[in-house]
Amino acid sequence: MNQRELNRAVARATGEGLSEISRRGFSIADPAVVGFDPEPSELAESIDWDEVGHARGIAMHPRRRSAHRAA
């Protein structure tokens, strides 16, 4: 499969245009290269928004009160 065929297959699968797929730079992964990660997780900082909210005193997932209360 060449790059053009790959781009067309991804565009069909995602519904995106060929120009968008080309811009994003899809490529075929080589299963023999197991250590390759184009976006290494150790470089990406993750944020636990629940922890941030707790530290700020904000409930990130507040419990909703029932609209129908028992009398």
Image (cartoon, helix red, strand yellow):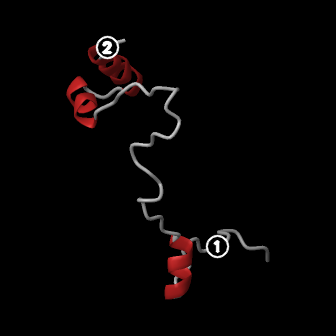
26 with respect to 48 (left or right): left
In the image, residue 10 lies at what x, y percent? Answer: 37, 23
Residue designated by label 1? 63
In the rendering, which numbered label is found on residue 26? none
Q: Nearest the camera: 11 or 64?
A: 11
61 with respect to 27 (left or right): right
How many other residues sit within 10 Å of disc 1, few (<14), some (14-19) or many (≥20)?
Answer: few
The image quarter containing residue 2 is top left
Residue designated by label 2? 2
How many other residues sit within 10 Å of disc 2, few (<14), some (14-19) or many (≥20)?
Answer: few
Residue type for callout 2: Asn
Task: Give the answer, above or below, for where 55 lies relative to 64.
Answer: below
**Rounded to the nearest whole Å, what is the CA distance between mark 2 and mark 1?**
51 Å
Which numbered mark, 2 or 1, is in the foreground of this view? 2
Task: Give the answer, above or below, for where 71 lies relative to 34.
Answer: below
In the image, residue 69 lies at what x, y percent? Answer: 73, 73
Q: Could you say whether the residue bearing mark 1 is in a helix, strand or loop?
A: loop
Q: Nearest the camera: 64 or 34?
A: 34
9 with respect to 59 (left or right): left
Task: Give the answer, above or below, for where 13 lies relative to 66.
Answer: above
Residue type for callout 1: Arg
Kindly check if marks 2 and 1 are in contact, taking CB atoms under 8 A apart as contact.
no
34 with respect to 15 (left or right): right
Q: Could you say whether the residue bearing mark 2 is in a helix, strand or loop?
A: loop
The image quarter containing residue 8 is top left
- Quick one: quadrant of the N terminus? top left
- Name which of mark 2 and mark 1 comes first in the sequence: 2
Q: Residue at x 47, y 64 (%)?
A: 46
- Quick one: quadrant of the C terminus? bottom right
